[in-house]
Image (spheres, helix red, strand yellow):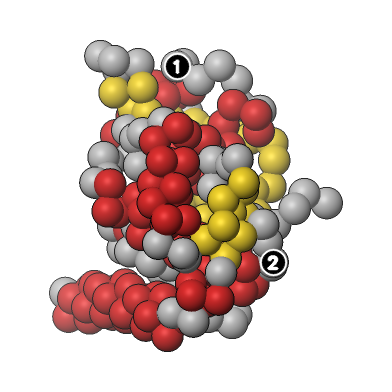
Amino acid sequence: MAEKKIYVSLSGLPLSFELKWPFHKSTSGADFHVLHTDIRLESAEGLHAPVAVNLSETLREVMPSLEAKDAEAPVINALRKDVDRRQIEFVKSGKLVPVHFSSRHYDFKRNVWVFGKAMDEDMSRLIARKVFWQTKLIGGPVWVGDPTDALYVQTTVEHLLQEAGKLAAQGLIKLERDRATATPALMNQSAKFEVDARAALEELEKKHAYERGVVAKT
């Protein structure tokens, strides 16, 4: 079994992804491939989002393959971005929800994935949250040189490690190459990280509650 990894949204939600490979051709007759995935919200017990990632044929043409080695990072980041956009709802149970993995995540002029450029302070916050949540939920050391995270914030692994170095200089982590170990100074900020996650979840739930209310009135 693959090692469980925690990926944090820019809004502060710790997530894990169970991607049920491989992609398969849609049985509905539509022209796309499907990958069933379960996104778990690790800061709230029992909350998850079962989704069907629908890969458009346009995007399929630019991908080297549909194997995990080529597709895992962009799929995780597309889903993570939809969490940031409050497009995905976390529930105790729930049916499979379609999520479009399409050309909006790809810049065809530059031939690169685009999930939104983050500022350095956002990257630093993302790394701190990742180290905190993975240490709390799984243990360390934590891989802070993950190319999936670099792709998500549109930077390089080297730049991420530079931001991690700043956290190390502040005494929040101990950094050895591309692995970080949380210090007591970081773990003592648990209240802040947990408040951030609760606030992000409340905003997400508020949006979906509003949308359900609008639909019910129409």
Q: Viewer-proximal residue, 195 or 60?
A: 195
Most foreground residue, 70 or 32? 70
State the residue position of label 1: 62
Does residue 78 show up?
Answer: no
Residue 92 lies, with reference to residue 23, above or below; the image says below
The residue that mark 2 highlights is 139
User: Residue 174's x, y, as percent?
Assistant: 57, 57
The answer to which quarter of the image holds residue 40 is bottom right
Q: Position of residue 38 (x, y in %)?
A: 60, 59
Q: Quadrant of the C terminus?
A: bottom left
Q: CA distance from mark 1 to mark 2?
A: 37 Å
* Amino acid type for the residue under numbered disc 2: Gly
Query: Could you tell me if the residues under marks 1 and 2 are in contact, i.e. CB atoms within 8 Å?
Result: no
| 54 sits left or right of 83 in the view | right
Q: Please give the name of the residue rendered at 46% of the width and 64% of the height, measured from the top-left corner.
A: 171
Q: Is residue 67 visible?
A: yes
Q: Tell me residue 35's x, y (percent).
A: 59, 42
The percent position of residue 184, horizontal first and vertical second, equals 55, 76
Kind of residue indicated by mark 1: Val
Q: 96 left or right of 103?
A: right
Quadrant hosting residue 33: top right
Q: Residue furthest right?
A: 1
